């Protein structure tokens, strides 16, 4: 009887493993852009990468596989770690568009490594490493967030702007409603930190968000710091 029971337990465990690996996957991506001035304007501060001060533009934070219920997979394949040699043709574009700002200064590859290992491996069945980074670069060139904001008179000048006017400017440019995430500066002011747009399963087109993120919500008026 006891051995029957332990056999059943083992069978159940094997089935659970099979189900959890089969349900790896995702429904859509968040494409997350970051305002470098807001990453730096915090008590923690920032460090410019060894390649120099990043462009005065939104940078890529990540392309994150997500589920429609708001949860997300992470660190999906330890057997497929980041390999810089696979994207050697993209590194000069990535240095401009996907800069690292964490301290100590790095050559950006540690940030790309983190993003690939944590998020990219969860969509590797659809986008291999090269396709993943290429997809993020393509999305960034379609979503000229700073241009959309500046055309609406919203400049990174340290001024305060209505959250709604920021959302409308980006939605007017890209055609889809963004989620705006705020962080706070050393004096406690909320500022425009990250812009989330939703992207289809293939990583190629923007879509209406199946679900919006919930963290880092903004008050009605927020600062747009200089960089
Ligand atoms: P990371 O890119 O791993 O450094 O993630 C940055 C932050 O964003 C983390 O603190 C997570 O809480 C959040 N985050 C990461 N991935 C997702 C995701 N797919 N959906 C929603 N939030 C996420
Ligand atoms: P957050 O979205 O601020 O919760 O960031 C989550 C993690 O991603 C933290 O460990 C950050 O240091 C890291 N991170 C976010 N943006 C950058 C960036 N531009 N460069 C390097 N690390 C970053």
Image: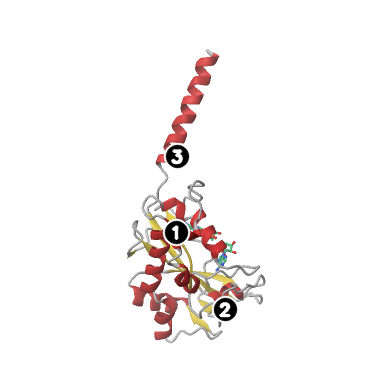
Q: Is residue 48 left or right of residue 27?
A: right
Give the numbered dot on residue 86: 1
Give the numbered dot on residue 20: 3
For marks 3 and 2 on the same chain, the one whose residue lies earlier in the sequence: 3
Q: CA distance from mark 1 to mark 3?
A: 29 Å
Residue 71 seen by the camera? no
Q: Secondary structure at mark 2?
A: loop
Q: From what the image shows, is residue 169 above or below residue 23?
A: below
The residue lying at 34 percent from left, 59 percent from top is 200
The residue lying at 55 percent from left, 15 percent from top is 2
Front in this rendered view, residue 93 or 102: 93
Q: Nearer the viewer, mark 1 or mark 3?
A: 1
Q: Quadrant of residue 104?
A: bottom right
Q: From what the image shows, is residue 100 above or below residue 52?
A: above
Quarter of the picture holding the C terminus: bottom right
Q: Which residue is mark 2?
A: 53
Residue 27 seen by the camera? yes
Mark 3 closeness class: few <14, some 14–19, many ≥20 residues within 10 Å = few
Q: Secondary structure at mark 3?
A: helix
* Residue farthest to the top, as pictured: 1
Q: CA distance from mark 3 to mark 2?
A: 43 Å
Give the numbered dot on residue 32: none
């Amino acid at each position: 009887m006891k051995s029957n029971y332990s056999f059943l337990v083992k069978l159940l465990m094997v089935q659970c493993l099979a189900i959890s690996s089969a349900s790896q996957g995702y429904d859509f991506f968040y494409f997350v852009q970051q305002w470098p001035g807001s990453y730096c304007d915090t008590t923690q501060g920032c460090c410019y990468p060894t390649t120099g001060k990043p462009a005065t533009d939104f940078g890529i934070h990540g392309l994150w596989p997500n589920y429609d219920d708001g949860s997300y997979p992470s660190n999906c394949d330890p057997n497929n770690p980041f390999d810089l040699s696979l994207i050697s043709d993209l590194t000069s574009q990535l240095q401009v568009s996907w800069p690292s700002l964490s301290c100590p200064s790095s050559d950006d590859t540690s940030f790309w490594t983190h993003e690939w290992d944590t998020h990219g491996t969860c969509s590797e069945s659809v986008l291999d490493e090269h396709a993943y980074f290429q997809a993020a670069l393509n999305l960034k060139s379609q979503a000229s967030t700073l241009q959309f904001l500046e055309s609406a008179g919203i400049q990174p000048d340290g001024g305060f702007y209505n959250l709604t006017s920021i959302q409308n400017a980006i939605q007017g440019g890209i055609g889809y409603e963004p989620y705006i995430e705020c962080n706070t500066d050393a004096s406690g002011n909320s500022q425009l930190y990250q812009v989330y747009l939703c992207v289809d399963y293939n990583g190629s087109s923007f879509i209406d968000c199946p679900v919006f993120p919930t963290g880092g919500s903004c008050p009605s008026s927020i600062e747009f710091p200089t960089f």
